[in-house]
Image (tube, rainbow, N blue to C red):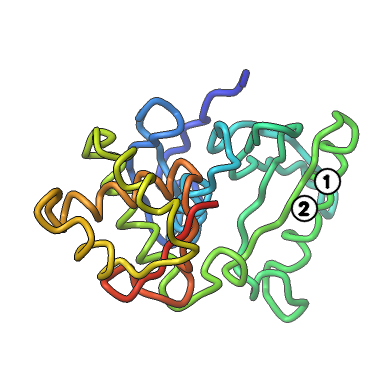
Amino acid sequence: MNYKPIIVPRNKKYGNNYWETRGPKVEKRDVILYSDLEFDHWLTVECDHNVNTYCEQPKEITFVINGTLRKSIFDMVICDFNSLPTFVEVKYECELKPSHKKYERTMRQIEAQVNWCNHNGFSHEVRTEKTIRKGRHTIENKLRIISNIQNIQRPTHCTVVSKLLESHRKIKVSDLYMLLHGQLEKYDILVTLHWLYYEGKIAADLDETIWGDKMEVSLR
């Protein structure tokens, strides 16, 4: 991917918060996000096994509104393993409603981004909290997964857990603990499951079930 993040001074970027983290999919380099929603979106991208790589704040374009030249930076460009790059703008739902004070500017910004993507042969998506935070536990679960991926090396016993899962269509984490009792500690099993999920090897309902004993997992 031939993009590098555009670093924006904190006082010049609209956002509800400012996050600095490390991105496992981008060789654990520093990643800067400029709002809580952008951070939550980053979590969903990092936890998507279909995503190969990404770049935040990758490209700046210009557009005109009310006779004034404006600038817009895409929030992210995402490359899946089997598709062309998709440029993404992250917005709160309220910003897309005509009653919002910045509605006109938001719509013109999105229009300019879509036109640029169409001209250059890329896809474009607007992502909001409805899809980013779609479940009660989505963000909490993904944050736990990414924290382990960032800080703990891939366990050597991933194969042991995968082999066991081959004989079960779906199994609770608590049952895995019992089946592996005496072989692996509970914490090691949990970290292994997080790695297997991150790699796309297993499926789990991250939206409605907190990752704990009652979580059910299955091989993809």
Picture quadrant of residue 129: bottom right
| Mark 2 closeness class: few <14, some 14–19, many ≥20 residues within 10 Å | some
| Amino acid type, callout 2 | Ile
Residue with the mark numbered 2: 110
Q: Residue furthest top?
A: 2
Residue at 41% from the left image edge and 40% from the top image edge: 32
**Depth check, front residue: 141 or 59:** 141
Q: Is residue 14 visible?
A: no
**Percent of width and height locating residue 128:** 62, 65
Residue at 27% from the left image edge and 69% from the top image edge: 175
Is the N terminus in the top left, top right, bottom left or bottom right quadrant?
Answer: top right
| Distance between the alpha carbons at the discs numbered 1 and 2 | 6 Å
**Percent of width and height locating residue 52:** 57, 32
Query: Can you tell which mark lies on residue 184?
Result: none
**Percent of width and height locating residue 152:** 22, 38
Residue with the mark numbered 1: 114
Q: Is residue 78 visible?
A: yes
Is disc 1 placed on a helix, strand or loop? helix
Q: Residue furthest front?
A: 167
| Amino acid type, callout 1 | Val
**Depth check, front residue: 83 or 218:** 218
